[in-house]
Image (cartoon, grey):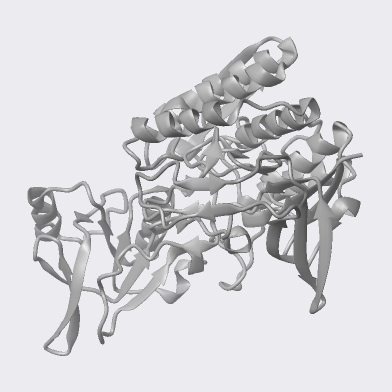
Amino acid sequence: MKSVGVIGAGASGIITAKILKEKGFHVSVFEEKNHIGGVWKYNKDINIGSIYKSLKTNLPKESMVFLNSNQTYKSQFSYIDHQDVYKYLDDNIKSWGLLESIKFNTKVISIKPLNNYSLKLNNISSHDVNEFYVDNINNTKWKLKAIYNDNVISYVFDYIVICSGHFSKPNDGIKNINGQHNIKITHSKNYRSPDKFKGNIICVGNGASGKDISLELKQHGCNVYIAKKDIGIDEENRSLNRNIYKKNIYESYFISMPLDIINKNDKSLVITSYGNEIEVDHIILCTGYIYQYDFIKDIIKVSENQNVYPLYKDIIHTYYPSMAFIGLQKNILPFVLFEAQAEYISSLWLRNSIEDLSTRKTEIENRYKKSNYKDVHNIQTHHWNYIYDLYSFVGIPESYKSKLRLIQLVFDDALNNKDNNPYDYRNFNYNINYKKNKWSKTIDNTRSII
């Protein structure tokens, strides 16, 4: 029986472990914390968790499902609290009997090829997609070292799957700001509730966390500006000339990115990219996260553009096909994508067959050129094509295909609805009837907007 080491017991890790066990692999899951669920486990300690207390999903639960599962969400609503998602994951892992396969409180510190292959990763730039050298190619076994109870323990596996996610290392977003000032700067990773915030606040970033946190702070009575990159000077001036103290929580005040902080008349002022000065008490960096793989830094590199090299189909290590990554991409439908990738690697390894090296390198080069070497792992525009391509290799029952199509329809409608109703899209509820091959949508205006 072939052995697999899975790093991480979040959503991607547990579905990967489930599928691999079903296919006959012996699976060991390594989890640094004392619980499953990864990012979906709330913790008020800012040094442990990454989500805020009021967080609700920005996708309907009807699309955040595993096809290979008999568990359901307990909430009647489509947009649910983080506790509901964690409960869904916990219910699944218990029904799958995976707890005995997880090594909790175990931190992986290094993973290296057991065979003495020579893999050279140069100091690659954004365009050096294929700047690697390997003097032998094979499905090497892996030596994994982990710390448990202050002891270093070694393991050997036939395969390795990295399911550690990418929501732990914050992207600071405004590296050029330094010096002494009175403005408190924090990352959204450390935000839990609005209780400790007051006065004028800049939320840097207009993504999901930026919108949610800014709205919650406005409800709490704070005066909030949202800093974003794609803004003209006229829009910024209009925001600054309006009366921000009028408590219209639905109206956003956009400014350009902070350029510097100065002290003037005992006040700390943010200088925007257009030279405007704003008195500010707090800056919250809603700027996302960066990739970090310290435990495999000798065989994986991350460029300045946040491109992870060298991965075939964003999953398989190009030169070590016995190592895979699940859930590395951004702007995805998470659970469905994780499951498709897990099915792909299990089929690939069972067949012991993969495209030749030249084909793998060409796929990477074409993908990077198409994205102009930026945002390579953002697959929002071709998300579903990517999923169906993976399943075309695996081969899936017709019942799975019909489920996928319904989930896709709900997912696409939810994204469109979110664009058209940015503040109350969570008031909409979806329903999927798989037996009748139908889906529907209703609205409930009695719910809170966040």
Q: Check the image and report above or below for 185 versus 140.
A: below
Name the residue: 76% across, 55% down: 114
Q: Is residue 240 above or below residue 365?
A: below
Q: Is residue 380 visible?
A: yes
Please, which residue is most extreme toward the front here? 135
Question: What residue lies at 35% left-to-right and 41% top-to-bottom?
Answer: 373
- Nearest the viewer among 243 and 282 is 282
Residue at (60%, 44%) from the top-left corner?
A: 80
Q: Residue at x 32, y 67 (%)?
A: 222
Instruction: Find residue 44 and report its image quarter.
Output: bottom right
* Image position, residue 323 (x, y; %): 68, 44
Residue 335 or residue 413, whichever sits in front = 335
Side of 56 where 100 appears, left or right: right
Location of residue 336 by image quarter? top right
Q: In screen coordinates, is 140 left or right of 414?
A: right
Percent across and percent down for residue 263 are 16, 84
User: Where residue 290 appears, x then y in whole percent?
Assistant: 46, 57
21 left or right of 53 in image: right
